[in-house]
Image (spheres, rainbow, N blue to C red):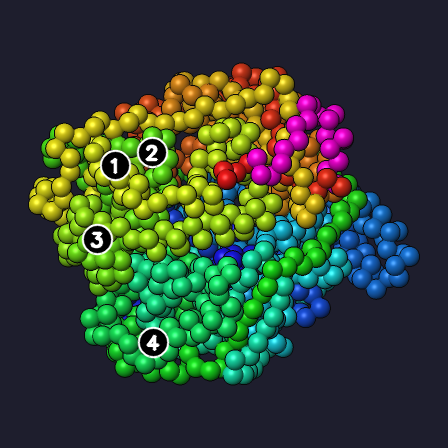
């Protein structure tokens, strides 16, 4: 629980002017071949070429985050991140000369409000509301998002951590000139327009965090771990009292101090020509004005006392944690520290901490390091067993695992496997452009530039077994923080909605917007997939098919067995998937099997789908046949073990309890209950009672039954298909006359005969969770382009109707979305599915807006070109990666396509008319009953008021889950 919170809440979703690596030896160790340069104004540029697909992931990173927030203005870095989507003096305004005095007046009003007596606050709020309403005559929401969308950009977003702020998205390689121009413009002369409505979005993001079970525990943990340091003092999302009195002047000062070229970096990874793109970067970004080094305040981080204690009552079950203060990524000991961590936890779950969970010695344990620039925390979060275990007993178990690392209880073979496994994990990251770019961005912040990353690579290869033992002895000692949280439910802070007027955009666009749209654009460059040429198919024997495609990057293979049966036929396969991942074979029982996989740097994972049971192996190619031998043992002679099943039962109980304490999770359970009834995954999945009554023998009988079905073997790697077929034939034994694979399973949905509201009360919910569904008709192939256009227009992005009307214009929610879903069965009806999570006192405002959008869709034909261009350009980044290729082809086949559907969709997108969007809406959405699903506080979402929207059905939370 604390582990998941650390992962969730730590993120809010080079100096030399040369392109040569620091040293010749470092150059040979650079897997990304990064070209780095510092412009004359101080901006660092890092580029990494990857020509697998015609796309680029681009980002601008700023070396600042919540760590640098003023103590009385927490949340500033994050709030500023939001405001840098609002445009500049040229972008996002129809007339800056007329808008500027109004923005200056707003700035002054917010300063007055900060010091005004309580009696004057309401009057100032009315002045703010009146002034911001005047800005609507000139402000143009979402111009940046629209332009990025038109050039085919996807994943347009940003994030703020304690130490960095990153603005990023993926875009077609053909559109790099336009992307560079837009990203250079957004930071040049930003205007923090629509300030009050965006503040509401920040409120909603804060509300969403408050609703996460354990949020207060996380904040208390950070305060205890970092007393007197911004990591402990500052909440990334901001303290409520600070959010209530924002300052435009403070925000401007923060931007001026930290958003200077010498404190920023531009990173690009993908299909780029470095020699061609560097002059363009110079032309666009070289004009940024240099500024002084921000020189953030340095803070001393004191060591923990011996067995320093922290107590709380903030979780639905008992939770504990032990934290050690360790070194940051720039430290010479960091590489050895990473290897020490892998002794404690790894992908094969053979680590000392992993075994505490898997062997049932703790209810659950997870290793969660907090990676921070000033200092790191190495944290083990755990749940003690329910009745028979004290905190003290659990702490002794966790402490013993650290002692084992300090004592060097690992041999040379294990150490070699540690290094090979870590190097394999690093290698796998570089297949992905996002991972490449964010690694460069993070190196700029945490390692002093890419040169620091190369030093890390060198140190990693040079680390010895003695280094690991030394580092463990130095950092995993008696000085540590011990957290104990007993069951309790802290009071949640609730924010109240202000009364600012909804945005009423003028309908125009900026001159800059028109100029950018008028730029000559290269034609789309789409790399179509030929299924027959891309993937080789071999029939190995009756019921066994091999599909193989090459890995052009590295020596890591991926192999999966897709058995032709799933949970629809054998419900217990859900538990079997968890069980198989924890047991061994008769030759290598229990932990021995995981130890063997660890030594091979190979992961084995098992998942159960509705109609397939999938076993996957991934690791270095040189170890594939040895891994197949281990899998063959698990298939033919699994060891019946009771302890793993007992642990699965305990975890099922704990996770269900945690899940039901989170209103967003309950909202998804309600959604699936309404749409699928007894076929909801929350009903089909085993609950605590079902797991308690399951025995090991029937699970292994189900494993035998699975292997009687036909199997499709998928392979991605460097070996020829024939060689892989030979290895499979030599080592794996399949049924002689297998049963045919079951047909693909897609559940039909239930649709109410009249608009119906399904309500689950949760008095502890800060936010209301609302889902909206409308059942349409089957979507034939010739309507797919219109379906995509409707989805993009209605809710496909930040420029869609739902996001703009709910968030941008009215500030009713942080996240608002909708999409038209076509299931993987052409004959199945499509459906519109929307979601909004909003502050409880905005529930009826959201209902009014969403119901009106769905039942009376606004027809704004001026957006057609945006929709059309977004769809056409977006296809350039839709080419599947080599790892995704077989899954993508399978999805296409299920949807009825024998060839790459983009061949037909591209001309269909280009020929779209706005009438096609309207016709699709009228056929599939208009005039149809809505299913409205709500989880919220009945004191705010008054059930009686809900009746005005349709028939009201009350549900109990327990009805949504299997027992």
Q: Residues within 10 Å of mark 4 (few under 14, many from 20)?
A: many
- Give how far across and how far down residue 532 sits, in percent: 20, 31
Residue under circle 1?
706
Label 4 and label 1: CA atoms lie apart by 40 Å
Disc 1 to disc 2: CB gap under 8 Å = yes
Residues shaded magenta: 940-959
Judge by depth and name the residue closer to the eye, 799 or 469: 469
Residue farthest to the right, as pictured: 119
- Real-space Cα distance between discs 4 and 2? 42 Å
Q: CA distance from mark 1 to mark 3?
A: 17 Å
Mark with earlier residue (4, 1): 4
Position of residue 387 measured from the top left corner of the image (x, y, whole percent): 51, 61
Helix, strand, or loop for circle 3?
Answer: loop
Residue for point 36% across, 27% down: 745
Image-based side of 779 in relation to 922, left or right: left
Say which residue label 3 marks: 585
Instruction: Tell me which numbered mark, 3 or 4, is placed earlier along the sequence.
Output: 4
Q: Earlier in the sequence, mark 3 or mark 2?
A: 2
Q: Secondary structure at mark 2?
A: loop
**Nearer to us in this view, 866 or 878:** 878
Distance of label 3 from label 2 (alpha carbons): 22 Å
* Residue 389 visible at all: yes
Q: Residue at x 41, y 43 (%)?
A: 693
Q: Residue at x 45, y 76 (%)?
A: 326
Point out which mark residue 570 bears.
Answer: 2
Pair 3/4: label in front = 3
Q: CA distance from mark 3 to mark 4?
A: 27 Å
Element marked by disc 4: helix
In 3D space, how far apart are the residues under numbered discs 1 and 2 (Cα atoms)? 9 Å
| Residue that mark 4 sits on | 405
Residue 760 percent location from the top left of the image: 64, 37
Residue drawn at x 45%, y 18% is 778
């Amino acid at each position: 629980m604390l582990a998941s919170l650390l992962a969730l809440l730590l993120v809010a979703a080079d100096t030399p002017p040369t392109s040569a690596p620091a040293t010749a030896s470092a150059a040979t160790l650079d897997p990304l071949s990064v070209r780095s340069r510092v412009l004359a104004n101080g901006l660092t540029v890092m580029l990494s070429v990857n020509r697998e697909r015609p796309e680029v992931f681009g980002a601008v990173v700023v070396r600042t985050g919540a760590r640098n927030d003023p103590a009385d203005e927490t949340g500033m870095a994050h709030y500023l991140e939001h405001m840098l989507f609002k445009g500049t003096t040229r972008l996002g305004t129809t007339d800056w000369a007329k808008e500027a005095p109004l923005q200056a007046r707003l700035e002054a009003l917010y300063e007055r409000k900060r010091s005004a007596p309580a009696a004057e606050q309401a009057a100032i709020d009315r002045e703010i509301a009146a002034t911001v309403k005047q800005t609507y005559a000139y402000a143009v929401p979402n111009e940046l998002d629209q332009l990025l969308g038109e050039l085919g950009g996807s994943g347009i977003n940003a994030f703020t951590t304690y130490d960095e702020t990153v603005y990023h998205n993926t875009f077609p390689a053909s559109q790099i000139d336009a992307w560079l121009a837009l990203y250079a413009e957004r930071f040049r002369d930003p205007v923090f327009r629509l300030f009050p409505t965006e503040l509401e979005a920040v409120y909603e993001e804060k509300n969403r965090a408050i609703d996460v079970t354990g949020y207060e525990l996380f904040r208390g943990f950070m305060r205890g771990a970092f007393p007197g340091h911004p990591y402990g003092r500052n909440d990334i999302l901001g303290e409520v009292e600070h959010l209530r009195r924002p300052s435009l002047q403070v925000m401007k000062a923060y931007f001026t101090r930290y958003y200077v070229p010498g404190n920023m970096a531009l990173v690009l990874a993908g299909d780029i020509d470095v020699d061609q793109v560097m002059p363009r970067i110079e032309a666009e970004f070289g004009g940024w004005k240099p500024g002084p080094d921000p020189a953030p305040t340095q803070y001393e981080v004191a060591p923990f006392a011996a067995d320093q204690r922290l107590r709380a009552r903030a979780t639905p079950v008992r939770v504990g944690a032990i934290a050690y203060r360790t070194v940051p990524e720039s430290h010479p000991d960091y590489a050895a520290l990473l290897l020490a961590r892998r002794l404690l936890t790894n992908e094969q779950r053979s680590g000392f901490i992993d075994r505490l969970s898997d062997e049932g010695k703790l209810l659950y344990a997870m290793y969660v390091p907090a990676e921070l620039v000033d200092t790191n925390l190495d944290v083990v979060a755990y749940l003690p067993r329910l009745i028979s275990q004290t905190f003290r007993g659990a702490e002794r178990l966790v402490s013993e695992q650290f002692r084992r690392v300090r004592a060097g209880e690992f041999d040379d073979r294990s150490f070699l496997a540690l290094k090979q496994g870590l190097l394999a994990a690093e290698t796998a990251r570089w297949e992905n452009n996002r991972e490449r770019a964010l690694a460069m961005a993070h190196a700029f912040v945490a390692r002093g530039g890419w040169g620091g990353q190369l030093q890390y690579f060198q140190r990693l290869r040079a680390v010895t077994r003695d280094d690991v033992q030394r580092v463990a002895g130095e950092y995993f000692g008696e000085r540590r923080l011990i957290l104990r949280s007993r069951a309790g439910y802290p009071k949640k802070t609730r924010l109240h909605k202000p009364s600012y007027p909804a945005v009423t955009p003028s309908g125009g666009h900026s001159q800059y917007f028109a100029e950018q749209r008028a730029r000559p654009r290269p034609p789309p460059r789409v790399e179509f997939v030929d299924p027959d040429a891309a993937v080789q198919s071999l029939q190995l024997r009756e019921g066994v098919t091999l599909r193989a495609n090459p890995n052009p990057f590295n020596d890591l293979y991926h192999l999966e067995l897709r058995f032709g049966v799933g949970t629809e036929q054998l419900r217990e396969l859900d538990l079997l998937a968890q069980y198989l991942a924890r047991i061994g074979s008769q030759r290598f029982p229990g932990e021995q099997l995981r130890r063997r996989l660890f030594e091979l740097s190979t992961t084995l994972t098992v998942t159960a789908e509705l109609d397939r049971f999938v076993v996957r192996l991934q690791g270095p190619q040189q170890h594939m046949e040895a891994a197949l031998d281990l899998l063959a043992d698990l298939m033919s002679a699994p060891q019946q073990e009771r302890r793993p099943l007992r642990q699965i039962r305990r975890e099922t109980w704990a996770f269900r309890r945690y899940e039901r304490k989170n209103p967003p999770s309950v909202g998804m359970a309600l959604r699936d209950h309404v749409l699928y009834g007894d076929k909801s995954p929350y009903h089909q999945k085993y609950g605590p009672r079902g797991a308690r009554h399951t025995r090991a023998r029937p699970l292994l009988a189900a494993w035998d039954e699975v292997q009687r079905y036909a199997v499709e073997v998928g392979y991605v790697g460097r070996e020829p298909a024939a060689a892989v077929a030979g290895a499979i034939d030599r080592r794996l034994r399949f049924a002689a006359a297998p049963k045919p694979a079951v047909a693909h399973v897609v559940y039909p949905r239930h649709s109410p005969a009249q608009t119906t509201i399904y309500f689950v009360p949760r008095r502890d919910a800060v936010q209301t969770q609302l889902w909206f569904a409308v059942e349409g008709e089957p979507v034939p192939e010739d309507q797919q382009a219109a379906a995509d256009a409707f989805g993009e227009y209605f809710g496909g992005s930040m420029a869609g109707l739902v996001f703009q009307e709910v968030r941008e214009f009215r500030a009713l929610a942080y996240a608002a979305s909708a999409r038209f879903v076509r299931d993987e069965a052409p004959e199945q009806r499509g459906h519109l599915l929307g979601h909004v999570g909003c502050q409880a006192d905005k529930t009826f405002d959201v209902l009014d807006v969403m119901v009106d959008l769905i039942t009376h869709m606004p027809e704004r034909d001026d957006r057609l070109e945006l929709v059309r261009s977004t769809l056409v350009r977006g296809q350039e980044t839709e080419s599947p990666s080599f790892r995704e290729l077989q899954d993508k082809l399978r999805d296409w086949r299920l949807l009825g396509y024998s060839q790459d559907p983009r061949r037909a969709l591209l001309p269909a997108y280009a020929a779209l008319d706005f009438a096609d969007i309207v016709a699709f809406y009228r056929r599939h959405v208009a005039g149809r009953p809505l299913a409205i699903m709500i989880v919220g506080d009945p004191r705010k979402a008054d059930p009686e008021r809900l009746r005005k929207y349709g028939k009201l059905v009350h549900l109990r939370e327990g009805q949504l889950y299997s027992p």
